[in-house]
Image (cartoon, rainbow, N blue to C red):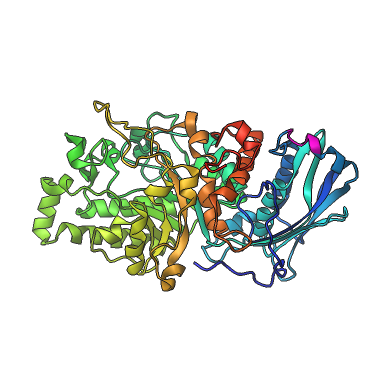
Amino acid sequence: MAPSHYVGLLALVAGCLLPSGVLALWPIPSTLETGMAALKVSPAFYFDVQVKGAPVDLYEAVAQAQYYLANDKLGRLVVGRGANDTTALASAKTLSKLTLSLTSWATAEPIAAEAVKPLGTRSEEYALTIPADGSAATLMANSTLGLYRGLTTFNQLFYYYGGVTYTLLAPIAITDTPAYPFRGLALDTARNYYPVSDIVRTLDAMSWVKINTFHWHITDSQSFPLEVAQYPGLAINGAYSPQEVYTASDVQYIVQYAAARGIDVMMEIDTPGHTSIIAATYPDYVACFDETPWAHYANEPPAGQLRFALPEVVNFTTSLLTGVAKNLPSSYFSTGGDELNTNCYANDYPTQLQLNSTGMTLNGALDTFTQVTHAALIAEGKTPVVWEEMVLNWNLTLANETIVMVWISSADAAAVAARGFRIIHAPSNYFYLDCGAGGWVGGYPAGNSWCDPFKTWSEAYTFNPLANLTQAQYGLVLGGEQLLWSEQSAPQNLDPIVWPRAASSAEIFWSGKQPTGAPLNVTEALPRLHDVRYRMVQRGLKPIPLQPHWCALRPDACDLTA
């Protein structure tokens, strides 16, 4: 997809030369100019909000930025951690404020309202200037969401040593806009449960690298932890415990917390597969429930899938999906559709009776199920999102606006694009964060994870969103996401298994290329990602180290060819 354009924002900075030395910026901005002067942040530094009718969440974002500026206290990743900067700082000018403003024609809506607008209509671009002479820095955008993105960048520019917060790169001029509108992180909270506190901590980290969509895979065959007003039994019978439930107030809190940080919550209730747990409440709606051997009926235990051929199941599912979706501000809702196992229905009496009495095929029944459920979502103003099998493995009539998530292989994007559907890249061969942990199925000590090996940040970073597509198809690519399936993950390892690896796709889909126009490059990126990771530690996260500390302090010294 071609980069989105400014609508009358400040002119792009010429030159765009990437300065030498380690920069903490991630994702790297569209255009960037820096100097070589030291600039200190005044102890009395403040954010000057010159926005008429500024919403409450903008002031909250400013307070957050002020907190990070005062408390990050990140030493430069060089030997000595900044001890050699004291000479330059002795004569440095002092920065006293950052002035925030909107373009003259912009309306100050809440960040939370801007964050959930349809893809392609959100304004995330901004322009940031920091003079070297100590005069006010300025941040201008077309929306409060753009101001929020700019604040995130501003916070990444400064280091700390000896009681002084500073940069060595003044003057700084940045204009920035995302290359793709969708930049996501998916989390499965059904295989294992994550408390709300873990989710909001993850949302914070997502906002630091400008990820704008939380893909919440909230239910699966193993548990149904979502409280649904119309169907309370689903969570009562389907959650692991009464304490491991996302109540309606939990969901609203998470959605509001995310939106205030520029993040849309796209919920997924996977159907008609991955639904075994529904049998705990509605046993007549599920085929092959807990059948063995499970591997004949499902990709993982327990077996069980919705009897989607039955009219009462179609009605139930439609009511369930719309009942949840209508309470969410996002324009997008995922109905899943992956890994449907036809063995489950071959000897299922209710399914076969329905098919035989109507003369319908299994594919025809799935088509009806999908059309009815999706039409109801569309009537609620939601765009359906599905996994790739709905397009590539079945002959279904999907609405033109349906979005398809490509996960089995990155190579499948071309086949989806050939059918004219918009794409979210989620390829297991690049973006699955759970791969490489070994097999988790019992009684099989030689087993490995199906998507071995471990997907390093650098492997993910080499992903090309436009590979194998024609230029005419580039516009179908909305963006992409990294994903954590939680068979072997839980709160105890959430931070290190996700971070900082999930920042890889954040830069792929925000930046698209280096400010110079050169392709993204792992050698150039590594020192910056070290900075991201160390700043995350300063903010209380527990991301995995990328290299020994010795290497992080000596950029490029641990490269294979060094």
Image position of 271 (left or right of 493): left
Picture quarter containing residue 402?
A: bottom left
Image position of 192 (left or right of 203): left
Picture quarter containing residue 391?
A: bottom left
Q: Is residue 443 above or below residue 537?
A: above
- Foreground residue among 54 and 441: 441
- Pinpoint residue 297: horizontal percent, then vertical percent: 19, 41
- Pinpoint residue 512: horizontal percent, then vertical percent: 54, 60
**Circle count:** 0
Image position of 181 (left or right of 275): right
Q: Can residue 185 be seen in this view?
A: no
Query: Magenta segment, which residues?
Result: 80-84
Q: Is residue 16 above or below residue 547?
A: below
Quadrant the C terminus occupies: top right
Residue found at the very far right of the displayed protein: 91
- Pinpoint residue 111: horizontal percent, then vertical percent: 64, 55
- Foreground residue among 228 and 109: 109
- Foreground residue among 309 and 423: 423
- Pinpoint residue 220: horizontal percent, then vertical percent: 34, 41
Q: Is residue 284 visible?
A: yes
**Can residue 227 be found in the magenta stretch?**
no
- Foreground residue among 115 and 186: 186
Image position of 253 (left or right of 357): right
Identify the residue at image location x=85%, y=55%. Answer: 136
Query: What secondary structure do most residues of the magenta stretch adopt?
Result: loop
Identify the residue at image location x=33%, y=69%. Answer: 418
Picture quarter containing residue 129?
A: bottom right
